[in-house]
Image (cartoon, grey):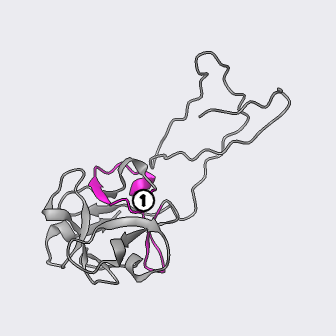
Amino acid sequence: VSFPPTGSSSTYRTVSVLAHLAKGTNTVRFAAVSGSTAPDIDAIRVQNIPGTDGTALVGAASNRCVDLAKNTITDATQAELWDCAGGQNQTFTHTTRDELVVYGNKCLDADGQGTTNGTKVIIWDCTGGTNQKWTVHSDGTVTNNLSGLCLDASEAATANGTKLILWTCNGQTNQKWNLN
């Protein structure tokens, strides 16, 4: 993080930084960059972003988490499977509005309001649309409220990078999820 200069040792500035920390213990280090001086830090405050204190969706077949590659927050990014690491890109809140929210303001979304097998599961700014509403069932399936189709690891794959799609519910373990 580059701290902007204040021009004086008696002039203070607050700098806010979005840091993706894993659940549990984290270490934050401050050091001077070559050719400059280290910042004079008086206090650090770590706080959750509202709506990001959710759970991981873990695939029953893969034991991998629903993930957004490289912590991307770009609309239309397709969800995928990846080793669980506890980051914000793998932390979802199932809201009272039946949304699965990540980063506090992005919803899992049926791309293009799709209702057919193979529809991509993406993230998008939460709009309240039915294509962004999901029902978590006691058997581990998660269905999209617009289509009734299941959240599915494409082609029953279990590897890192497997894309998530919607597919007709068939009882297979690639359509079963644990909320941890």
- The N terminus is located in which quarter? top right
Which stretch is magenta? 74-102
**Magenta stretch, overall SS:** loop
| Up/down of 32 relative to 160, above or below | above
The x, y position of residue 166, in whole percent, is 25, 73
Q: Is residue 90 magenta?
A: yes
What residue type is disc 1 on?
Thr
Look at the numbered disc 1 and give the secondary structure of its residue. Answer: loop
Left or right relative to 151: residue 98: right
Residue at point 27%, 81% (across, down): 115
Name the one closer to the observer, 161 or 142. Answer: 161
The x, y position of residue 26, in whole percent, is 49, 40
> How many numbered circles does the render carry?
1
| Up/down of 123 relative to 30, above or below | below
The residue carrying pointer 1 sits among few (fewer than 14), some (14 to 19) or many (20 or more) residues within 10 Å by Cα, namely many
- Residue 91 quadrant: bottom left
The x, y position of residue 163, in whole percent, is 24, 59
Left or right relative to 134: residue 154: left
Q: Which residue is mark 1?
A: 91
Residue furthest toward the right? 10
- Residue 98 quadrant: bottom left
The x, y position of residue 28, in whole percent, is 55, 35
Left or right relative to 85: residue 45: right
- Residue 122 quadrant: bottom left
Residue at point 71%, 38% (across, down): 43
Residue at point 17%, 56% (across, down): 158
- The C terminus is located in which quarter? bottom left
